[in-house]
Image (tube, helix red, strand yellow):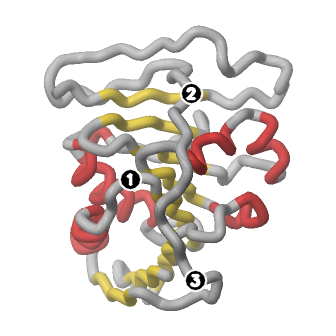
Amino acid sequence: MPMIKTSIAFHQNLDVGLRQSPGIEIVGEGGCIPSILPPSPTTQSRELSRNSNVKILMKRYTTSSEETEAAGARFAASLRGNETIAFFGDLGAGKTTFLKGMISALTGCSTAEITSPTFNYLHIYEGKIAVYHFDLYRLTSAEQFNTAGFSEYLNARGVCCLEWAEKIESKLPPETIRITLEHQGLDNRLITIS
């Protein structure tokens, strides 16, 4: 099955129509390439129901980027689609590294092809389960996220991953899975899933 990687660029001038015609390129088997403007995802009601009290589901220490990536791949095995996952942590804490393992496990893309969409805001990876990977570092407000039409991805089929999710904390669905990565010195990380 061909893998698709799509990128969306967010324009500071929100008058630019983000929902014009879709432009997805499919390269050969296993190819993940950037393109422009994906079609809107199909929305559906969430089947997940989580307690609104924050409960720690897992804590894991890793001692290298390879272990952090492997932790992401193991976590992917628990996902079925229709999840929103919010990532928290300082710059360089390992959010993208964890996501590389997770996205690769869900889509079959090589980890070398998975990058953070810092300047595009969104990469879409299609595979067994579609992954909507946001990097909100440059976002100035939660309202900007809504105005760009990105909030529809919070209820999309697939897995919606949000790096720097604190930027849209007030917009996160109550059943959001929260993953915090913390520096523990050198290459050591503490990963907390709640």
Secondary structure under tag 2 reads: loop
**148 shown above or below 76:** above
Q: Work out whether mark 1 precedes mark 2 in sequence or the reverse, and give the earlier one.
A: 2
**145 shown above or below 96:** above
Q: What residue is shown with label 3?
A: 51
Judge by depth and name the residue closer to the eye, 146 or 46.
Answer: 46
Q: Are marks 3 and 1 in contact (CB under 8 Å)?
A: no
Q: In x, y percent, where is residue 68? A: 30, 71
Q: In x, y percent, where is residue 168? A: 73, 59
- What number is the disc on residue 81? 1
Badge 1 density bin: few <14, some 14–19, many ≥20, Cα 10 Å: some
Secondary structure under tag 1 reads: loop
Cα distance, mark 3 to mark 1? 19 Å
**154 shown above or below 60:** above
Residue at the top extreme, as displayed:
21
Q: Work out whether residue 28 can be spotted.
A: yes
Q: Amino acid at mark 2?
A: Ser
Q: What residue is shown with label 2?
A: 40
Badge 3 density bin: few <14, some 14–19, many ≥20, Cα 10 Å: few
Q: Quadrant of residue 99?
A: bottom left
Q: Work out whether mark 3 precedes mark 1 in sequence or the reverse, and give the earlier one.
A: 3
Q: Amino acid at mark 3?
A: Asn
Q: Work out whether mark 3 precedes mark 2 in sequence or the reverse, and give the earlier one.
A: 2
Q: In x, y percent, where is residue 101? A: 28, 58
Name the residue: 24% across, 42% down: 128
Name the residue: 47% across, 61% down: 47
Q: Work out whether residue 65 can be spotted.
A: no
Cα distance, mark 1 to mark 2? 16 Å
Q: In x, y percent, where is residue 77? A: 23, 64
Q: Quadrant of residue 87?
A: bottom right
